[in-house]
Image (cartoon, helix red, strand yellow):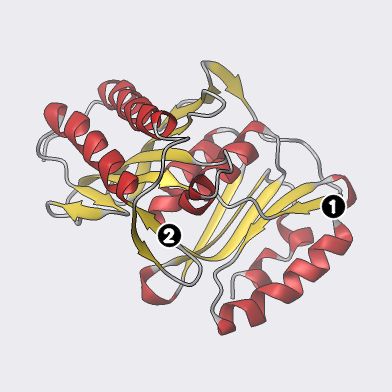
Amino acid sequence: MKSVSLKSALPLAVTAARAAGQVMHANWHKPKRVNSAEAHDIKLELDVQCQARIEKILGAAFPHIPVLGEEGDTGDVNAEYRWVIDPIDGTVNYFYGLPHAAVSIALEHKQKSVVGVIYDPFTDELWTTMKGGPTRLNGEIVRVSNRSQLNDCLIAMGFSKSKDNLKKSLPHLVRLSQQVKKLRIMGSAALELAYVASGRLDAYMERTINLWDVAAGSLLVENAGGEFYTRPAPDGKLRMCADNGRLRKKLQIDSLLK
C-alpha cells in the first residue's frame, strides 16, 4: 500500500469523531437499545451505528485502509495501515447516564499509532495528534503534568472483573490509594489517557484492556511528553500504564504489569 498522508488523515479522523459524537449527544436522553449485556459490560445498538458512521467517512477517502474496531473488523487488519476505532468508549457510563464517554480513532502504520483523535461530545473537547507533532486540545498544545511525588498525584486505574485479574490488581489499588493524593476509577480508557496527556491525571493503568481502547490515547500521551508502557495479556489484550514520565519506579509499573 502506498504511503498515507497524515496531514490528510488527521482532519478526516476529526470529522469522523465529531460525527459519531453528534450521534451520542443526539441520543443522550433517549431510550437505549441494548444489543447484549454481560456481567460487567453493555453493548448498545448505538455503538454499531457510531462505528458505521465513522467507517463511512473514513472509507470514502481511504477505501483501501481496513478497520479494526470494537464493533467488528473490515478488510485485512494485518495490513500496513489500519484504522483502530472505539465508537463509544465508556458505553456503560453512557447507558447509565454518566456523561463520561468518548469517541476514539487511531491510524496505525505497521501496528504503531501515527494519528490519534479522541472526542468528548459532552464537553466538546477534542484531542488530536500525529506522528512527530504535538498533542492538542481544541487546537491548543497540551503537555503532561510535572508532578513527581506520589502524594501530589491524581491517578486513575481500571481493571476487568475476572478472579485472576482482581487478585493481582486489588493489592495495587490498595497500595496506590494510600500513597497518592486521590485515586479514580472513571470508566473510559480513552478519556483517562487524554487526561494524562493534558496534565489532569498524572498516570492511568490497567492490567487487561483492548487495543481500540488505547490506540489513539497512547500517541496523545507520548506526544505530550509522557510515557506509555504496554505488555501482552491473555486473549490478545494488553497490560498498560501511561504516566507523565516521572513516576514509573514509584508506581511499581513492572510489578503491576506482570
At 22% from the left and 40% from the top, the residue drawn is 52
Dot label at residue 42: 2
Q: Is residue 153 left or right of residue 235?
A: right
Element type where label 1 sits in the image: helix
Visible in this render: residue 210?
no
Q: Where does label 1 land, which residue?
A: 150
- x and y percentages locating residue 90 in the rendered image: 50, 49
**Disc with the residue nearer the chain's start (2 vs 1):** 2
| Tag 2: amino acid | Ile
Q: Is residue 127 left or right of residue 245?
A: left
Visible in this render: residue 149?
yes
Q: Is residue 75 left or right of residue 252?
A: left
At 17% from the left and 46% from the top, the residue drawn is 66
Q: Few, some or many C-alpha atoms within 10 Å of disc 2 (few <14, some 14-19, many ≥20)?
A: some
Say if 37 sits above or below 23 in the image. Answer: below
Locate the N terminus by quadrant: top left
Viewer-side residue, 96 vs 157 = 96
| Tag 1: amino acid | Leu
Picture mark count: 2
Locate the C terminus by quadrant: bottom right
Q: Nearer the viewer, mark 2 or mark 1?
A: 2
Q: Which quadrant of the view contains residue 42? A: bottom left
- x and y percentages locating residue 64 in the rendered image: 10, 39
Viewer-side residue, 144 vs 139 = 139
- x and y percentages locating residue 208 in the rendered image: 51, 68
- x and y percentages locating residue 103 in the rendered image: 42, 38
At 75% from the left and 76% from the top, the residue drawn is 171
